[in-house]
Amino acid sequence: MRSRNRATLTSRSNSSLETLRIERTSFSQDELALYCEIPRTTYQRWISGKSEARPTIRQLKLLCQNLGIERIDELPDDFGSVKETLDDD
Protein backbone atom coordinates (compact mmCIF):
# COMPACT_ATOMS: atom_id res chain seq x y z
CA MET A 1 0.00 0.00 0.00
CA ARG A 2 2.84 2.42 0.78
CA SER A 3 4.30 2.19 -2.73
CA ARG A 4 0.89 2.93 -4.24
CA ASN A 5 0.60 6.06 -2.11
CA ARG A 6 4.07 7.14 -3.18
CA ALA A 7 3.19 6.82 -6.84
CA THR A 8 0.01 8.82 -6.33
CA LEU A 9 1.83 11.56 -4.45
CA THR A 10 4.58 11.76 -7.05
CA SER A 11 2.15 12.05 -9.94
CA ARG A 12 0.21 14.83 -8.20
CA SER A 13 3.28 16.95 -7.50
CA ASN A 14 4.86 19.25 -10.05
CA SER A 15 7.88 19.78 -7.82
CA SER A 16 11.12 17.89 -8.22
CA LEU A 17 11.91 18.82 -4.62
CA GLU A 18 8.74 17.05 -3.51
CA THR A 19 9.60 14.07 -5.71
CA LEU A 20 13.02 13.83 -4.02
CA ARG A 21 11.37 13.95 -0.59
CA ILE A 22 9.02 11.13 -1.50
CA GLU A 23 11.60 8.94 -3.25
CA ARG A 24 14.52 9.40 -0.85
CA THR A 25 12.96 9.79 2.59
CA SER A 26 10.11 8.66 4.76
CA PHE A 27 9.62 12.23 6.00
CA SER A 28 6.33 14.04 5.73
CA GLN A 29 6.37 17.57 4.31
CA ASP A 30 6.12 18.91 7.86
CA GLU A 31 9.06 16.79 9.06
CA LEU A 32 11.36 17.77 6.20
CA ALA A 33 10.51 21.43 6.67
CA LEU A 34 11.19 21.14 10.42
CA TYR A 35 14.49 19.28 9.97
CA CYS A 36 15.63 21.87 7.41
CA GLU A 37 14.51 24.85 9.51
CA ILE A 38 12.08 25.97 6.80
CA PRO A 39 8.63 27.23 7.80
CA ARG A 40 6.05 24.65 6.72
CA THR A 41 4.06 27.20 4.71
CA THR A 42 7.23 28.33 2.91
CA TYR A 43 8.04 24.74 1.94
CA GLN A 44 4.49 24.27 0.67
CA ARG A 45 4.73 27.46 -1.42
CA TRP A 46 8.01 26.22 -2.91
CA ILE A 47 6.61 22.87 -3.99
CA SER A 48 3.34 24.34 -5.27
CA GLY A 49 5.21 26.90 -7.36
CA LYS A 50 3.56 29.82 -5.57
CA SER A 51 7.00 31.20 -4.73
CA GLU A 52 10.54 30.55 -5.89
CA ALA A 53 12.62 28.44 -3.53
CA ARG A 54 15.19 30.74 -1.96
CA PRO A 55 16.67 28.80 0.96
CA THR A 56 19.39 30.22 3.14
CA ILE A 57 22.77 28.50 2.89
CA ARG A 58 22.01 26.71 6.18
CA GLN A 59 18.62 25.53 4.89
CA LEU A 60 20.22 24.40 1.64
CA LYS A 61 22.84 22.38 3.53
CA LEU A 62 20.14 20.79 5.68
CA LEU A 63 18.03 19.98 2.61
CA CYS A 64 21.02 18.33 0.96
CA GLN A 65 21.81 16.31 4.09
CA ASN A 66 18.22 15.20 4.62
CA LEU A 67 17.63 14.35 0.94
CA GLY A 68 20.97 12.60 0.43
CA ILE A 69 22.17 15.13 -2.15
CA GLU A 70 25.96 15.00 -2.46
CA ARG A 71 26.65 17.13 -5.56
CA ILE A 72 25.34 20.54 -6.58
CA ASP A 73 24.09 19.19 -9.91
CA GLU A 74 21.71 16.90 -8.02
CA LEU A 75 19.74 19.91 -6.79
CA PRO A 76 16.35 20.21 -8.43
CA ASP A 77 15.69 23.07 -10.83
CA ASP A 78 13.23 24.46 -8.25
CA PHE A 79 16.31 26.03 -6.71
CA GLY A 80 17.08 28.05 -9.84
CA SER A 81 18.59 31.24 -8.42
CA VAL A 82 20.45 29.48 -5.59
CA LYS A 83 21.76 26.75 -7.88
CA GLU A 84 22.90 29.26 -10.51
CA THR A 85 24.76 31.27 -7.88
CA LEU A 86 26.49 28.17 -6.51
CA ASP A 87 27.32 26.86 -10.00
CA ASP A 88 29.06 30.16 -10.82
CA ASP A 89 31.56 29.70 -7.97
Image (tube, rainbow, N blue to C red):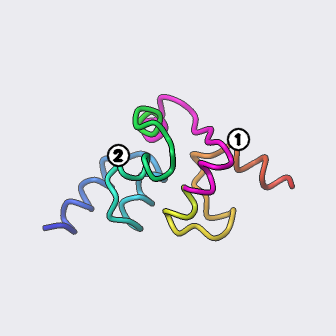
Q: Is residue 79 above or below residue 48?
A: below
Residue 7 image offset from top left, x and y in percent: 26, 61
Is 32 left or right of 76, judged from the image as shown?
A: left
Please tell me in which quadrant of the rendered image residue 80 appears.
top right
Q: Is residue 40 left or right of residue 77?
A: left
Identify the disc placed on residue 13.
none
**Earlier-in-chain disc, 1 versus 2:** 2
Instruction: Name which quarter of the figure residue 82 lies in.
Output: top right
Residue topped by disc 1: 81
Disc 1 packing (10 Å; few <14; some 14–19; many ≥20): some
The x and y percentages for residue 6 are 26, 61
* Residues drawn in magenta: 46-62
Mark 1 or 2, closer to the camera: 2
Seen from the viewer's position, the closer of residues 29 and 14 is 29
The answer to whether 13 is drawn above or below residue 65 in the figure is: above
Indicate yes or no whether the magenta region holds residue 12: no
Calculate the distance from the C-alpha at mark 1 to the C-alpha at mark 2.
24 Å
Give the total of numbered labels: 2
The residue that label 2 is drawn on is: 30
Residue positioned 44% across, 41% down in the render = 47
| Identity, as a three-letter code, of the amino acid under mark 2 | Asp
Classify mark 2: helix, strand or loop: helix
| Quadrant occupied by the N terminus | bottom left
Q: Is residue 24 above or below residue 58?
A: below
Task: Look at the image and say whether residue 48 sits in the magenta stretch.
Answer: yes
On the image, which quarter does residue 55 sit in? top right
Residue at left offset 20%, top offset 59%: 5
Please report the residue visible at 38 percent of the width from the left and 65 percent of the height from the top.
25
The residue positioned 62% from the left and 46% from the top of the image is: 79
| Amino acid at dot 1 | Ser
